[in-house]
Amino acid sequence: MTLEPYRARWMTDDVVAFQDIARRFFEREFVPHLEGWRAQGCIDRNLWYKAGELGLLGASMPEEFGGGGSKAFMAAILLEQGRAGDAAWGISVQNYVSHYILAYGTEEQKARWLPGLGSGQTVAAIAMTEPGAGSDLKQLKTVANAVQGGYVLNGQKTFISNGQSADLVCVAAKTDLAGGSRGISLLMVEVKGADGFLRGKPLKKIGLQAADTSELFFEDVFVPQENLLGQEEGQGFRQLMTQLPWERLSIAIRCVGLAEYALDQTIAHVTARKAFGGTLFDLQNTQFKLAEAKTKLESMRSFVDSCLDRLVLDQLDIATAAMCKLHCSQAINEIVDECLQLHGGYGFMEEYGIARLYGDVRAQKIYGGTSEVMKLLVARSLIA
């Protein structure tokens, strides 16, 4: 008896159809240009427009804003991005900012910013991390002092994805210096023509070369009152913490796609490469290593599918999302390391996809909260 291929519950017929659109988009508009984008250190702005035209950028926005209305659509995109061998394009950050606005923005803010984010006319970034404050947001030094009609923003942010191309930056800042975590607010900064806003040079990284990662500087930048996300100061920390499970699951989803890419590239290599009177695949060690990698991939996929099912039911909690991100980011690094080893010397050459991936996947254990932070979150849940 032939069994039907397994399909997770979140993969509805509509999601499968949308996934096909995303796959063809990456094959046609992305893969042929990736090497050039790595060399120039950023993705062409035109790609954002093309993605917007296909509805990829607004996939999880409500239909009233021209979106698909489901995070499952965005999950399908992230899988296809990974399967294309990329983790650099900041589409996930664009999605995060959209959901901050959807969850906490006023109706005026939604109408003002969401259409541009969905069309690609606006590129967004989230500015949380600072040189002296990474995962510990309570240590933020960026300050927004209240003035007539708004705020004056001063501070420095670093490691900001989409930093060079962003038009709209969601900035975490202290609006109450004595308030601790309750003194943090999110300000939406429209950077075009904003006096005092400066971008640093693109940061040089060991991977994700096509990602325009930057430092951002705010020197007496005036932010209008209506750009405070929501209607009340001091809600930033809660807003950030509420959205982080989806952000961390997004990283895990893309890790699954990257693992599929690594495995496909390696199988193609070892079945073509001749050694010891046969192919590399004929060697038992190769078969065992690939079997282990495939097993890890399927464990990643199962965990991600489970989390997505919970997400659809609005039941994904902080600890479970942290476990998924921890597991998948660790597994993808192990898989890519073994796959590179099976490529031998070719795996060390940058023209091979597995070599480029080796640098890219290392960041998965860092951004979105380091693996150590994920372990702390999980540990705290054990005695809650």
Image (cartoon, grey):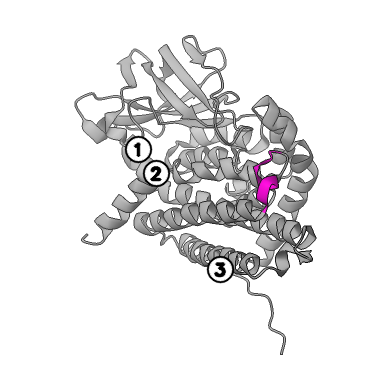
Image-based side of 215 in relation to 382, left or right: right
> Of 170 and 149, which appears nearest the observer?
170
- Residue for point 60% across, 46% down: 64
Mark toward the viewer: 1 or 3: 3
> Are the residues tagged 2 and 1 within 8 Å (C-beta)?
yes
Quadrant, the C terminus: bottom left
Q: Residues within 10 Å of mark 2 (few under 14, many from 20)?
A: some
Locate residue 209, reporting x and y percent: 61, 32
Q: Are marks 2 and 3 in contact (CB under 8 Å)?
A: no
**Place of residue 51 in the rendered image (x, y in percent of width and height, measured from the top left):** 71, 40
The disc labelled 2 sits on which kind of residue?
Answer: Thr
Pointer 1: what residue?
135
Helix, strand or loop at mark 1: loop
Image spot of residue 91 (x, y percent): 60, 40
Q: Is disc 3 surrounded by few (<14), some (14 to 19) or many (20+) residues within 10 Å? A: few
Count of marks, rendered view:
3
> Is 153 within the magenta?
no
Specify start and end residues of the magenta stretch as a single range. Answer: 343-350
Which label belongs to residue 370? 2
Residue visible at 30% across and 36% down in the picture: 136
> Which numbered circle lies on residue 295?
3
Mark nearer the viewer, 2 or 3: 3
Q: Nearer the viewer, mark 2 or mark 1?
A: 2
Real-space Cα distance between discs 1 and 3? 31 Å
Q: CA distance from mark 2 to mark 1?
A: 8 Å
